[in-house]
Image (cartoon, helix red, strand yellow):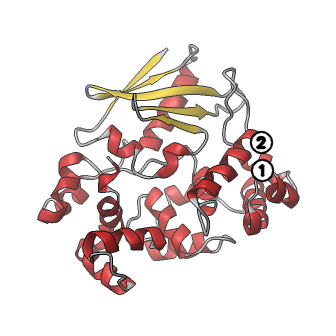
Amino acid sequence: MEIRIEVPASFNFKRTVLSHGWCELKPFEFDRASFMLKRVVDLGESDPVTVEISQLDGVVAIKSPVRLARTRAELVSQFVRHMLRLDDDMDEFYRQVALDPAFQWIAAEGAGRLLRAPTVFEDLVKMVCTTNCSWALTEVMVTQLVRALGHKTKDGRYSFPTPKEMARMPESFYRKVVRAGYRAPYLRELARKVASGELDVEGWLTTQKAGPDLKREIKAVKGVGDYTAENMLKLLGRYHGLALDSWVRGRYSELHARGRRVPDKRIERHYRSFGDWSGLVLWCDVTRDWL
C-alpha cells in the first residue's frame, strides 16, 4: 500500500532527513544509498507497522507492507507530516536568510526543517540520552530501550515504548539494560509523570507560552539543562536558543575562527541579527556539509 502526501515547494526531503542524528536512532532506520527512511509507527491498539518514506516528484511517498484501514492510513499520514515538519511555515525564515549572502543557500536548498519523532515524549527521552556522552552511547541506550520495551512488528522491528511501558520498569532496568547511567532515575521519573498525566509534554506543541517561559518549564524536568531544553525548543518550532555544546562550538571554530577556540558570546553575536531564528541558522550553518 502506498500513501502520497503533497509537500511545500520549499521542502527538501534529503535536508530534512539528514537535519540531525534522529534518522540513525531506532525506531528510525536510514539507508543513505537509496535515501530511504524507515520508521516503525505505533498505531495504538493495532500492531505497529514499518513504513518506508521517500520523495517522488512533488510528493512524499509512504509505503506500508500491509493494507491499512482508512483510519490507520490517516494516522500514519499525520505522523509523517509531523515528523517531516510539512506543516511548518518556513517563509519568514527563508526571507531572512535570503538577505544575507552567507546564508542564502539555506533558502535555496530548502534546509531548516528538523526531523522529529511522532511524539514529544520520544523526542525528549532521546534528547536526554544525548547529554554528556558519545553518540555511540546514545545509540546503545535508545536501541536497548526500543528492543526491551517496544511493540514488535511482523517484520521483527520494534516501536518506541509508551510512557506507561517505561514507567513500570524499575530504575535498575535503566542502569543495567539501557545503560543510562546517571540518567536512569530521570528517565523513569519522566515516564512516570507523563504516564500519570502529571506532566503534559505533548501540550508543549500548542502552548501559547513565550519561548523563555516554555524553556523554564522544559528545564523543570529532572535531567534537562540548557542544551537539552534549547534543542527540544527547536523540535517544537522555537528557534531562539543556540543549544551550544562541545561539537557545535568545535564546528563553529573550524568554520569561522580557523580552529581557534572562541567564547560563546562571539558565537551569539554572529547569529544575533536573525533574532528568533538564530538557533536554526546556527544549526544549518554547522551542518551544511552533511549533505
Front-lying residue, 286 or 190: 286
Q: Is residue 135 above or below residue 133?
A: above
Q: Is residue 281 visible?
A: yes
The residue lying at 69 percent from left, 53 percent from top is 141
The residue lying at 32 percent from left, 28 percent from top is 59
Judged from the image, the secondary structure of the residue bearing numbered disc 2 is helix
Question: Badge 1: few (under 14), some or many (20 or more) residues near its Cα, within 10 Å?
Answer: many
Question: Badge 2: few (under 14), some or many (20 or more) residues near its Cα, within 10 Å?
Answer: some
Judged from the image, the secondary structure of the residue bearing numbered disc 1 is helix
Disc marking residue 128? none
User: Where's residue 10, x and y in %?
Assistant: 23, 43
Q: Amino acid at mark 2?
A: Leu
- Find disc 2 in the rendering and name its residue: 149
Horizontal arrangement in the rendering, residue 34 relative to residue 271 (left or right): right
Horizontal arrangement in the rendering, residue 265 relative to residue 121 (left or right): left
Q: Is residue 241 visible?
A: no
User: Where's residue 269, x and y in %?
Assistant: 28, 82
Front-lying residue, 238 or 102: 102
Front-lying residue, 57 or 195: 57
Front-lying residue, 225 or 34: 34
Q: Is residue 112 above or below residue 275?
A: above
Q: Which mark lies nearer to you, 1 or 2?
A: 2
User: Where's residue 97, x and y in %?
Assistant: 19, 62
Q: Earlier in the sequence, mark 1 or mark 2?
A: 2
Q: Residue farthest to the front?
A: 259
Whether label 1 touches label 2, CB < 8 Å: yes
Q: Amino acid at mark 1?
A: Met
- Find disc 1 in the rendering and name its residue: 166
Residue 138 sits in which quadrant?
Answer: bottom right
